Image (cartoon, rainbow, N blue to C red):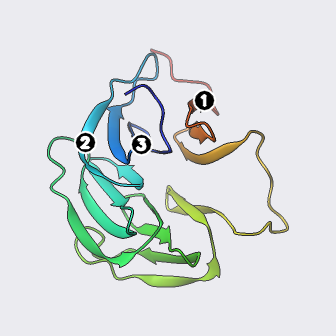
Amino acid sequence: MNGNLMQISFDGSRVCGVAPANSIWCADDNPNGALNWRQVPGGLKWISVWGDFLWGVNANDDVFVGRSSGDPLWRQLQGKLKQISSDSKQICGANSANEAWCADECIFTAPKWRMLPMKLKQLALINVRCTASAPTTRSGSRQLPGNFRQLDIEGGRIFGVNGDTVNYHKWLTPPPRS
């Protein structure tokens, strides 16, 4: 894994991403050094990691859940999403019509989806909170500096992917002492 990812997800201890050929890569966090990437079997265009679980969406917008280490044992879940996020308590995502959907019951087997009353291009669950990007600029929002295709934030750290599929990492708070 050379670090070129189209999409990235971080849960505070594990980082996973999708490379340009829809291959899935994961690494355990190493705040003081390089990540030791390993390929996860399967092909998805968007993933969300939380602990040992990975939720993902394939090129057909089908939704899957599996393990982030070893054999993922992928299971297809009902629903169609272009993007997905999880915090292990719920899953949310946006479909091709920018409709936002969430489920907090049966998220590993048969999510009980409910549609949110808003249009969103992308959303992320962070500590039971939802952050999102809307299809149009909304008043009251604040633009972050930089040109990123996708970002994920957890535990005072931000991981991002720019338009050239180059990965970035930054501490938002001072890193822990070793």
Which residue: 39% across, 62% down?
A: 59
The residue lying furthest to the right in this view is 139
Residue at the image point whose x is 42% and y is 57% from the top: 87
Q: Which residue is mark 2?
A: 40
Residue carrying label 1: 171
Q: Quadrant of residue 45?
A: bottom left
Q: Which residue is mark 3?
A: 17
- Front residue of 151 and 5: 5
Q: What's the CA distance linking mark 2 and mark 3?
A: 10 Å
Residue type indicated by callout 3:
Gly
Numbered disc in front, either 2 or 1: 2
Q: CA distance from mark 2 to mark 1?
A: 26 Å
Q: Where residue 75 sits in the image (x, y, percent)?
A: 20, 65
Q: Residues within 10 Å of mark 1 (few under 14, many from 20)?
A: some
Check the image and report above or below for 18 versus 129: above
Residue type, mark 2 in image: Val
Gap between marks 3 and 1 measured at Cα:
19 Å
Of circles 3 and 1, which is in front?
A: 3
Q: Please name the residue shown 37% across and 68% down the image.
A: 60
Q: Is residue 31 above or below residue 70?
A: above
Quadrant for the N terminus in the image? top left
Compare marks 2 and 3 and give the one earlier in the sequence: 3
Q: Label 1 amino acid?
A: Trp
For marks 3 and 1, the one nearer the N-term is 3
- Mark 2–mark 1 CB contact (< 8 Å): no
Q: Secondary structure at mark 1?
A: strand
Residue 129 position by quadrant = bottom right
Position of 142 relative to 158 (above/below): below
Percent position of residue 154, x then y:
52, 43
Look at the numbered disc 3 and give the secondary structure of its residue.
strand
